[in-house]
Image: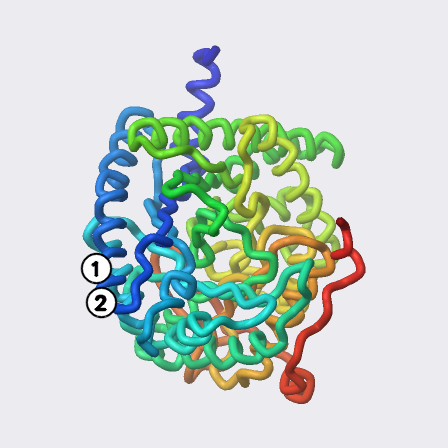
Amino acid sequence: MINTRDILETIEMIQDENLDIRTVTMGISLLDCADKDINVACEKIYNKITTLAKNLVPVCQEIEKEYGIPIVNKRISVTPISIVGNSCEAEDFTPFAETLDKAAKTVGVNFIGGFSALVHKGYTSGDRRLINSIPEALAKTDFVCSSVNVATTKTGINLDAVAEMGKIVKKSAELTADNNCIGAAKLVVFANAVEDNPFMAGAFLGVGEPECVINVGVSGPGVVRAALKKAPNANITEVCDIIKKTAFKITRMGQLVANEASKRLGVPFGIVDLSLAPTPAVGDSVADILEEIGLEKCGCPGTTAALAMLNDAVKKGGLFASSHVGGLSGAFIPVSEDAGMIAAAKDGSLTLEKLEAMTAVCSVGLDMIIIPGDTTPETISAIIADEASIGVINNKTTAVRVIPAIGKDVGEELEFGGLLGSGPVMNVNKYSPAKLINRGGKIPAPLQSLRN
């Protein structure tokens, strides 16, 4: 039973501590839209998305108004377009991206994800054509997001795909250099990608998912920090308990919104993603939580331990609030989207190497990191390979979303605005990994993959 205290506490979290539902994401299967003729396939895709998602935004707005809970983003994820387009005869898949963009604008969502390919064990014809189309597709669209999965614990790392994606990331930045290299900010390279992720840029609807589904991503770093601030002398076990209890409350609100959206749209509920997703707003930062736990500055020694504890406590607390937890579920550390991370990177406390260590214990990976514009494709590929290795060995999802700031160098800044924020160009080791990357082939799956 909900009591007055719970209601007042929730109002305080929303008004003063940046609590919100970060995204309600509708997943839509496009498997039945495949066609030899790309124009016919695009027409099917547009009609299906605009039919199924026509009420997504109005329903979310109704829920916001009735419950007073902010829903920041309304999004769509679709079947990886490389699968849908595999039977298509066209070489250029950019029309698919333009169709997704048009559909997103028609129904009024913030982003649409699924211009994606899964190449962890090799390429199909559709995979190759999609990957080659990514830079132009992202340059010609506003709301389309792209992702490519290059590794899994079961299969190892496709080094050929890793090498290719370094070039694709660089070209995506170059083609949008006059727009703050935004193309690279809408592209993520995964290891162990999940099928029900509601967050962008990596959302797509896996082939094991329903015809249509509602997935919800919650947030609330500010709420966690505020709770910890009230217990400055708590020992670390007590800190864990505070985080767990707070994560439970945040997730319970997400479950409420998910159930309401599912019922009103007549679409099955999928999962709640527990991830603590920060924003550039002051007071809504994962870095601030780590500093509240006891670090002088995020990035100093002890940061990885504090983040591991935070991530674990968030998962434990959230699991009690929902029977269907999925997606990525943990603490995000996107540099440009987190005010505390931005400050730590500017101060030099937070380095690329320290961020990589932190990704071993948190959700996702090297996210929204701005690197010098002259960084070579081979170096970008090597960053992807390093991060994929962490995911493969630890059997977790990791990803890389780096933005080569064309024409800028270390210490300069790149400004995206909105949720993507801004950040300093971070230093990248200048020594070359080109020989390693150009060897090609596949890094075999680790021993722990043999679990059957």
List the single residue furthest toward the left.
106
Q: Is residue 178 above or below residue 333?
A: below
Q: Secondary structure at mark 1?
A: helix
Tell me where residue 180 appears, x and y as whole percent: 36, 73
Tell me where residue 30 appears, x and y as whole percent: 35, 53
Q: CA distance from mark 1 to mark 2?
A: 6 Å
Tell me where residue 276 appears, x and y as whole percent: 53, 44
Q: How is the image coloured?
A: rainbow
Instruction: Work out whether residue 289 can be spotted.
Output: yes
Tell me where residue 85 appears, x and y as whole percent: 36, 66
Q: Which residue is denoted by mark 2 in the rendering?
A: 39
Residue 394 left/right relative to 138: right
**CB of mark 1 within 8 Å of CB of mark 2?**
yes
Q: Nearer the viewer, residue 18 or 386?
A: 386
Q: Secondary structure at mark 2?
A: helix
Q: Which residue is denoted by mark 1 in the rendering?
A: 43
Quadrant for residue 44, please give it.
bottom left
- Category of crowding for the residue at label 2, using alpha-carbon neighbours closer than 10 angstroms: few (below 14), some (14–19), many (at least 20): some
The residue located at (68%, 52%) in the rendering is 361
Give the amino acid at mark 1. Answer: Glu
Instruction: Work out whether residue 421 can be spotted.
Output: no
Q: Nearer the viewer, residue 347 or 181?
A: 181
Q: Is residue 107 above or below residue 14?
A: below
List the single residue furthest toward the right.
447
Number of marks in the rendered image = 2
